[in-house]
Image (cartoon, rainbow, N blue to C red):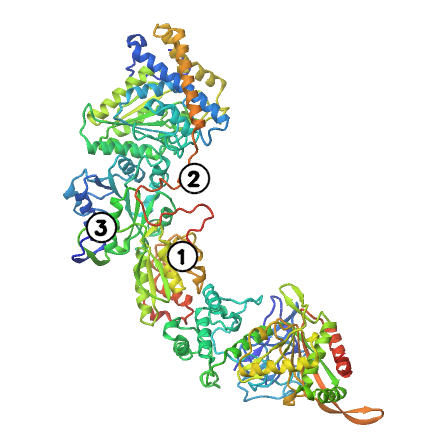
Amino acid sequence: MAAKARIRPNPVEAPGDEPGSEPNAPLRGYYERMSLVRAFELRASEMYARARIGGYCHLNLGEEATVVGLMAAVEARDYLFTGYRDHGYALLRGLSPERVMAELFGKVTGVSGGRGGSMHLFDTETRLFGGYGIVGGQIPPATGAALALKYREAAGPDAAAVLCLLGDGTTNIGAFHESLNLAGLWKLPIVYVIVNNGLGMGTTVEKASAEPELYKRAASYRMPGLRVDGDDVLAVRDAARSALKQARESRQPVLLEVMCYRLRGHSVVDPARYRSADDTAIAQQSDPVPSFRAELIASGVLSEADAAAIDESADARVSEAVTFAEESPEPDPTDLFAYVYATAVANAPSALPGEPVMDAL
Amino acid sequence: MPDVIMPRLSDTMEEGELSRWIKQVGDEIHKGDVLAEIETDKATMDLEAFDNGILEQLLVVTGALVPIGAPVARIGDGSNIVADGAEPAAPAATPAPAVPATTPDASAPAPSAPAPSGTSDPATSATPTGELRTSPLARKIGREHGIDLHSIVGTGPQGRITRTDVDAAIADRETGTPTPTPTSAPAAQPETGAAAQSATAPGATATSATPSSGATPGGPRTATDSVAVPVSRIRAVTARRLTESQAVPHFFLTRIVDVERLVAFRTEVNASLTALGTKVSLNDLFVRASAMTLRAHPAVNASWGAGVILRHPHVNVGVAVATDDGLLVPVVVDADQKSLSAIATETRALAGLARSGNLSLAQMSGGTFSISNLGMFDIDSFTAVLNPPEAGILAIGAAKDVPAVRAGALVTVPMVTMTLTADHRVLDGAVAAAFLRDLAILLEDPLRIVL
Amino acid sequence: MTTDIATTRTITYRQALNETLRAELEHDEKVFLIGEEIGVFEGSYKITAGLLEAFGPDRVLDAPIAEEGFVGAALGAAMLGMRPVVEIMTINFSLIAIDQIVNHAAKMRSMFAGQVSIPLVIRMPGGGGQQLAATHSQNLEVWYAHIPGLKVVAPSTPADAKALLTAAIRDDDPVIFLENLSLYSAKGEVPDGEQIAEIGKAAVVKPGTDLTIVSYSRGTTTALEVARQLEAEGLSIEVVDLRSLRPLDRDTICASVQKTGHAVVFEDDWLSYGIGAEISATIGEGVFDFLDAPVRRVAAAEVPLPYAKSLERAALPSSADLARVVREVLNLAPVSSASIDN
C-alpha cells in the first residue's frame, strides 16, 4: 500500500490479505471494476460540465477500492441501500453504464426512466434498492427490509441480508440511532457500512461527531463495530463478507466503518477550497486506483500493457454509455403522472400547471 | 325619543358649530339621514340621525357653538312639534334654496325619501361605485331568463341579489302581477314558496328573537303598530335608486321664469297642429328647451363615473311619470334632435306605456337629464331628487299669475318656478347657473325653441 | 362497495377498526402491525386489543419510541412486498417521521419509475377537545393531503372505518388513515362480511337542496347533527363527507353545490391554507356560476390549542358555529345561541 500521512487507527479487524496470496483472476477483475468506476466518474464530471447532466452529482472518485471491495462481498440475493454517492455501486451491482449514464442524462432509458437522476439510482432486478438523496433517508427503509427478510426466511448461509451504506456525516442524524437500535433490538440481518471519507460536505468528522471513531457507536446497540482501510480493496471485501456472514447466519447486525478519501469536492460543483493543500495531497497520494494498479504490476498480476488495455477498455465502455445516453429520447411529458400511484384511484389529479382542476359546470 | 346631540367628530373636538340645518321641523327622519352640517375644529361634518321619527324641534340656531353631548334637536313621533323659534331666539335659518315640505302622497312622482322598506338591512344592492351586488347564480339565472338584475332589489347581505330575488322576479313576470318584494331574510326555499311567506315569517322571528332593545315600552310606538304595505318592484327600485342618490353631494338653483310668451306660443302651436291630432304641452316645451340648452352646455349633459366625468354624446331627457305602481322615468332619446311635435307624440306614448305597465327597460334607460313637473298638482315649487347617474334634474312648478310691471302698468304675468338639482361632483354652481339662465332665456323667447 | 349485504351490527368505530385489523391479519400473512404500545399495552386507544395474543409478536410488533425509525422500517418492509399497518399514537408524533412519509414513502414509486410500490398504511388519530393542549391536539391532515404519492382517507363512521381500512390495507400505495380521538367511541351500523370502499370518492351522507356542508372525519358527524337541527326549521341541508382527502372527489362536491348554490366547509384544522381553502377554490372553479353566496369555512381558531377548557372550547369549531354560519350564508336571521345546543 502507498504510504499514508494521515494517521489511521489500526482496524479492529483487518482480514485483508496481500494481493500476492489471491488468485490472479479476481484481482484483475477488481482492477477492471475500479478502472470502470474511475472512467465513469471522470466522464460524468465532464458531462456535467458540458451541461448534459443536471442537478446534483456526487462522484465516487477516490472511493473506488471501497466500492469494489463492498460490491465483491455482497451477494446477488442481498439488498443494497445507499446514499446519493451511488454511481459506482450501481455499475458494480450489474447495471449497464448505458442505463446509469442515461439516468444521469435524464433520459427515458435510464435506470429510473430519468425520474430519479444521479442520487436515486434504483433497480429491482439487481436488488439495488436506491439511491437516496436525503442524508440517511435510506437507513430506516434498509432496516425495514431486513425486518421483512427476517419475517420471510430463516437465518442461514443462503439467507439474504441487507447492506446499507451511509456516509460519515449521516451517523449524526436521529434515524441512524433509531434504526441501529431497532436492528440491534430485533436482531435484523443487516450490515451498516459507514463510508468515512473524512468530510460531510466541508465539515470534518472531528467537527461533526463527538465520538469521531464512528465504528465505536455500535457498542450502544450491542453490535460489533469495526473499522477497515477503504483504500484496500481486499480488506474491505473481507471485512464486509465477514459482517454479512454474521447478519445472514446469526441475525447479528454489524456496523462497519470504511476509511477512505474523497478525491474531489462534495459534488461536481464543489472546488473543495476548504481543504488544505496537505489534505488534498494526501488524498491524491492515497488514490487507490493508481496504487492498486502499481501493486498489481509490481506483483506481476498485470503487465503495464494489460493495465493500459483495461483502462482503455473502461474508457471505451463509458464512451459507449455516453453515446447511448446522448441518443436516447427524453421522457414524454404525457407520461408525467404515470407512476404516482400503483393502485389506480378515483379522482387522481392530472392537471398540468394552469390547467383547470375540473371543467366548470 | 332621545335628543339629537352634538356628536364627537374629531379626536380633538370639544365643541362644534351647527353651521347649517339640512332637515326641517316636521321632516320624517330615518337613521343615518343627515340632519345638519357641523363645523368642527378640523372640517365640516355631517350630523347624522341615530333614530327614526319626525324632527320635532330644533334646539339651537344656525351658527351656535354646542359642546359635545349637548342636545341640538329632538326627534319624536310628530306629536310634539315645536315650531321654529320656541326656545332658540332665532329660527334655524334655511339655506338659500328653500327646502320645501315634502309631499308624503305616495303617488307624487318626486319623493323626498325612500319609503321604509322594513328590511333589517337597509343597504342597497349597489356597491359604493354603483355596481350591482349579485351572486354568480343570480346572474346566471338572470341571463337564462332575460331578467335585468337592475330591475331587482337584492335581499341578501349588503343588498346582494341572490337566487331568491331572481326567482321571485321570474315568478312576477309569469304571473304578470308584481308580488311583494321580500322584505327580510328569505327562507331560502324557493321550492316552498318562500317569497309568499316572507312578509310574515321573518318578521315573527325578528320580533320574538330580538324585542327591539332600544324601544321605550311606554313611549310612542311606531314600527310595531304599523301595517306593512307590500311594495311593487318599481317602488322598491325607486327606493333604492333614490337612496343611492342621497349619497350624491348636490345643490339646488331656483329661477322664476316668465312664461307669458311660452303659454301663448303653445296655444299657437296647438292651433296649427290640430289637423295632425297632436297636442303640445307646456312640459313638452320644457323638454325641448332643456334638450337644446343641454346641447349648448355639454358640461351639464354629463355624469360622475368613478373618478372621471363622463360627457354624453346624446341628449336623452327623462320625463317623470306618476303611475299607480310608482314613479317611472321614460326617456326621450336624442330630444335635441327631435321636433316639438315628435317629442309631444313620443312623450305621450311613453307615459301611456308607463301607466299601463308596458314600459320596457330600454325605454327607461340611458337618460342624461330628467324633468319632473308637478305643475298639474298646482305645486308652486319643489326640489327633485337626482336620478343617478344623471347630473341634473329640473323640478318644474305650476304656472302662477304673479303681479308684474309691464310698460309702466301693473299686470299679472304667468310665472313658473323651476329648481335645478345638480350633482356637485359634476357641476359647480356657476356652470349650473349658466345653464339655468340660458334655459330661462330660451323659455322666455319661445320661438327659438323650434328654430 | 362489495359483497355480503346480509346483516349489520351496531358497533363502535374502535371496534370496527379492531375487527378489520384482525380480519386483514387473517386474510393476508404479509400484513403485520407495528407501532408504539400496540401489543402488550393493546394500543394507546385500545384499537389493537387482543391482536398480539391472537397473532403473536411477529405480526403485532411493539416498537420503541422511534417514529422515524419504525415508520421507515415499515416502509422498507413494504418495499419488499410486506403490507405493514403502522399505528402512530397521534398525528402529532407523525412529524417526527415526516421525512420517511413525505420524502420517501410518497416519492419512491414515482422516483424509481414504478419499479417499487409501497403498500403501507399509517393509521393515526388527530383532533382536539380532550384538553391535551397544543402539542397533542392538532389536525395536520392537510400536511399529508398536500403530498402527491400519498393517499389520505378520513372515515367518519364505523362502517367507513371498516371499508376504508380494508381498502387501505389492500392498496399498493402509501395510505394515511386519519382517525379522530372523539370518534373512537362513536357507534354506527356496520355491515358484516368483507367491505372495501373506493378510495378517492366522497359520499353524500345526507341529501338536501338549500346548502351543502362539506366535511370529513369528526366534522361530518357535527355537520349531520346541524343539518338535522336545521331541517326541523324547514331548511334542507346536504352533507358531503369527503372520506378521501387525497385524491379529492371534486366532482361530488361540485355536483352538490351546483344543486344547492350555497356551501360551508366544516373542518377541524386551522383556517388558513386548510382543507376548506382547497374546497372553496374547487367550488369557485367548478361551479362559480351556481354560487348564490360566497363559500364560508368554519375551522379552528388559528392559535396553538390551549389546555383550559374554556379556551379550548372557544378555539375549536362547534356545531353552534356551523349552524350560525349556515344561517349567515343563507342570509337568515340569527337565532339566539341558547336555542342551538352546542
Q: Residue furthest front?
A: B275
Residues flagged by tags 1 and 3 on a common chain: yes
User: Where's residue A330, x and y in %?
Assistant: 43, 33
Residue B92 lies, with reference to residue A133, above or below; the image says below
User: Where's residue A38, x and y in %?
Assistant: 41, 19
Residue situated in front as seen by the camera: B436 or C181 = B436
Q: Secondary structure at mark 3?
A: helix
Write the residue at 34% across / 44% down.
C150
State which tag comes first along the sequence, 1 or 3.
3
Tell me the amino acid under the disc marked 2.
Answer: Pro
Subunit that carries the residue with mark 3: C
Residue C300 lies, with reference to residue B133, above or below; the image says above
* Residue B28 shows in this picture: no
**Contact? badges 1 and 2 (CB < 8 Å):** no
Q: Nearer the viewer, mark 2 or mark 3?
A: 2
Q: Residue furthest left?
A: C54
Write the residue at 17% across / 29% down.
A154
Q: Residue furthest right?
A: B408
Q: CA distance from mark 2 to mark 3?
A: 41 Å
Residue A120 lies, with reference to residue C96, above or below; the image says above
Work out which quarter of the rendered image holds the C terminus of chain C and state it: bottom left
Q: Quadrant of residue A21?
A: top left
- Badge 2 is on which residue? A333
- Badge 3 is on which residue? C17
- Badge 1 is on which residue? C301
Residue neighbourhood size for the residue with mark 2, other residues' Cα within 10 Å, grouped as few (<14), some (14–19), many (≥20): few
User: Where's residue C268, x and y in %?
Assistant: 35, 55
Q: Nearer the viewer, mark 1 or mark 2?
A: 2
* Residue B125 shows in this picture: yes
Q: Secondary structure at mark 1?
A: loop
